[in-house]
Amino acid sequence: MLYYFTHFSSDDSNIQSLVENGLITSPEKIWLDAAEMQSRPFIVIAWLHEFTKSVPLSGLEIGSNIAAIRGGINATIAAVNTQLPYPYVHIFYWTVQLVLITLSVETGICIAVDSYWKENGDNLYIPSDDNVSWPASSQTWFTFNVILVIMGNLLFIIFTQCILTLTEKLSNPMNKDSSLSATALGTPYDNFLFNLLNFHLLDSFLVKNLEAIHAGFKCYEDLDINK
Amino acid sequence: MIRSELLLAISIAAYLTIVVNRWDRVRSTLLANILITFEDLHHRLCSVLLKTQEKNEDKIINQTIRYTRLILQLLFLAVQGNYVSCTAL
C-alpha cells in the first residue's frame, strides 16, 4: 500500500460556518458548494479581481497581486499534499517498532542475566584485578544495573515515539493539530512560533494591519509635516 | 543492538529534518508570500482610495477584506484533512 493518497472531502459544514460568520453570502455559498475544496480559493480570487475592476478606482491594477496570490495558494496546496520523500514510510515506521520490541526483549534478558549473577555470581561482577571489593552488596550492584538498563532503554523508546508523533503532527503544517500548543506548549495564542500556521492568528494579522494602513493614510494630513 | 539503534537514530534524524523543513517552508515562504501580497494589495487600495476621495470607502474596504479572509480560510479548509499521516497506516 502506498503512503500517499488523497481524497477530496465534501464536508459542507465548514462552508456553513462561514455563512454564519458573515464571511460569505448565500448566493456565494451556492457557487462554492458546487466546486471541489481545492478549487474554492480560486473562485474567490476571481471575485476579488472582478470587484476591484467594478469599483471606480483610478489607477488600481491588481493583476500582479492576483497572480502572486494564485501562485502562492497553488504552491501551498502542492507542498502540503506532496508525498514525503520516503515512498514506503510505513516500512520506516515498522522498523522503528521492531527495534523497540527488540529493545524490550533485550531489557528482559539483561535483567534475567543480572539476576542470575546476583544469586550465583559469587561476586564475579567485581573485576579480578580490583583490590577494593565494591560494591560490597550484590543487591546494590543488581539494583544499579537494572535501573541503568531500564532507564536507558525507556528514554530511547520515549524519545523515538515522541519524534514519530511530532513528525506526524508536523507532516501537514496547516493541520489544526499541528500547533501542538494547546496540549504541550500552553494556551493556543501563547506560543508564537507554533501558531504562525493558525488561521485565526493570520486572520487577525490581516484585519489589524489593514486597519493600521487605512488609519495611517487617513491621519497623514493631520500630521502637519509639510506646513 | 547498538548498530541498529545508530541506524535508527540516523533515519529518524533525516526524516525529522525533512518534515520540519517542509513545515518551515510552508510557514516562512509560501504562506508568508501570500500574506505579503495581500498586504501589498491593501496598501495600494488604501492609497488609491485616499486619492480618489471615494464615498463608499468603508464599503470597498470591508468587501476587500472579506474576500481576502475568505481566500485564506478556504485555503486552510482545502488543505486540512486531505492528508494521511504515516502512523495512521
Image: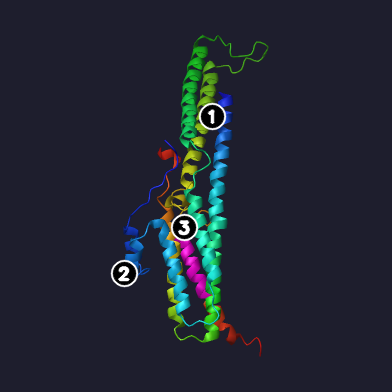
- Of the two numbered discs 2 and 3 in the rendering, the one whose residue sits closer to the viewer: 2
The chain letter for the residue carrying disc 1 is A
Which quadrant of the figure contains the C terminus of chain B?
top left
At 43% from the left and 54% from the top, the residue drawn is B79
To which chain does the residue with label 2 belong?
Answer: A
What are the residue bounds of the magenta stretch? A199-212
Amino acid type, callout 2: Ser
Q: CA distance from mark 2 to mark 3?
A: 26 Å
Left or right: A10 as drawn, with respect to A207: left
- Residue depth check, mark 1 versus mark 2: number of the one nearer the observer: 2
Dots 3, 1 in contact, CB < 8 A: no
| Quarter placement of the N terminus of chain B | top right
The residue singled out by tag 3 in the image is A198
> In terms of secondary structure, where does tag 2 sit?
helix
Residue A208, magenta (yes or no): yes
Q: Chain of mark 3?
A: A
| Labels 3, 1: one chain | yes
Q: Give the number of the disc on residue A152.
A: 1
Q: Quadrant of residue A50?
A: bottom left
